[in-house]
Image (tube, rainbow, N blue to C red):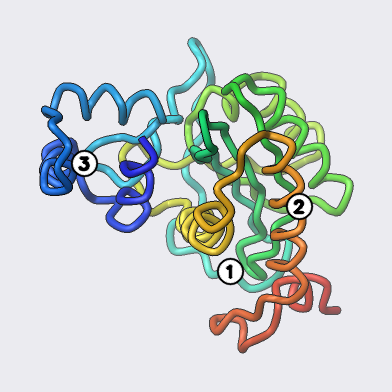
Amino acid sequence: MNLLDEQYTRTPYYGIRKMTDYLQKLGYEVNHKRVGRLMRKIGLEAIYPKPRLSQPAEGAQIYPYLLKNVVIEHSDQVWSTDITYLRMRGGFAYLVAIIDWFSRYVLSWALSNTLEASFCLEALADALRISRPEIFNSDQGSQFTSLDYTGRLKDEGIRISMDGRGRALDNIFVERLWRTVKYENVYLNDYGSMREAVQGLKAYFSFYNEERSHQSLGYRTPAAVYFEK
C-alpha cells in the first residue's frame, strides 16, 4: 500500500492496470484484482487523479461548482479542503487540511485514523477562528456534504462550492499541497504512530506557512501573503 501511495503521488493518472504493471516490474506477484482492493482500501481511485474519499452522504445536498473562470485576487476569497491517505509504519491515517487559494496558506489541519466527519469539523472550526472566506470549495465527500459541515458554513454566511464528479483538478491547490507534504515530510520521516505524525506535521506546516517560499508567490511565504494588508 505504501508503494501504491508513493506511485500515485508521482503519477496520479495511473489506474489499476498500470499500478499492477508497476508492482510486477518491482518483482511483486500481484494481479489487478488485488491491486484494486488495496487501492480502494487506502482511498485511491483508478483512472481519475482523485482520492476515492468523495462519496456523498446519503440524501445529502450537492452544491454547484462556483469557481469556473473565477479570478482569484485576494486572501479569504476562496478556501478549499480535501482528505488524503497518510502512511505510517504498521498502519495509516487520514489527513485533512484547509488552504487559502490566493496565498496557499494552510489555515488548519487535522489527523484521524477513521473517515468520520468529526476531524473535518475540527479543522473547519480551527480555520474559522482565524477568518472566513467568501467561498468554500470541497469535493462531494460525506464529511463535507454532512448537515453539520454545510450548516456551519451557512451559519457563517459562506457560499458553498463543490467539485463536479470526476473533475480531478477542481481542487488543484490542495492536490499540490498533498504532493509537497508527502515528499518533503511524510516519506522522509516514516512516522511510527499518530503521536509522532501529529508532532511532525505540526512542525512541518509551521515551516510551510512561515518559512517555505513559493515561486508562484514571488518567493514569499504563504503567511507573508495571507496576512499582507
Tag nearer the camera, 3 or 1: 3
Regarding mark 2 in the picture, which secondary structure is present there? helix
Q: Which mark is residue 146?
A: none
Which residue appears farthest toward the front when viewing the image?
27
Amino acid identity at mark 3: Ile
Residue drawn at x 87%, y 53% as measured from the top left:
130
| Disc 3 crowd, CA 10 A, few/some/many (<14, 14-19, 20+) | some
Of the residues under marks 2 and 3, which one precedes in the sequence?
3
User: In screen coordinates, is 37 left or right of 220?
Assistant: left
Q: Position of residue 101 (x, y in %)?
A: 61, 62
Regarding mark 3 in the picture, which secondary structure is present there? loop
Q: Which mark is residue 202?
A: 2
Q: Position of residue 86 (x, y in %)?
A: 53, 40
Is the residue under label 3 in contact with that under label 2 (CB below 8 Å)? no
**Disc 2 to disc 1, C-alpha distance:** 28 Å
For the C terminus, the image quarter is bottom right
Of the residues under marks 2 and 1, which one precedes in the sequence?
1
Which residue appears farthest toward the top when viewing the image?
58
> Which residue was labeled with disc 3?
47
Amino acid identity at mark 2: Lys
Amino acid identity at mark 1: Ile
**Disc 3 to disc 1, C-alpha distance:** 29 Å
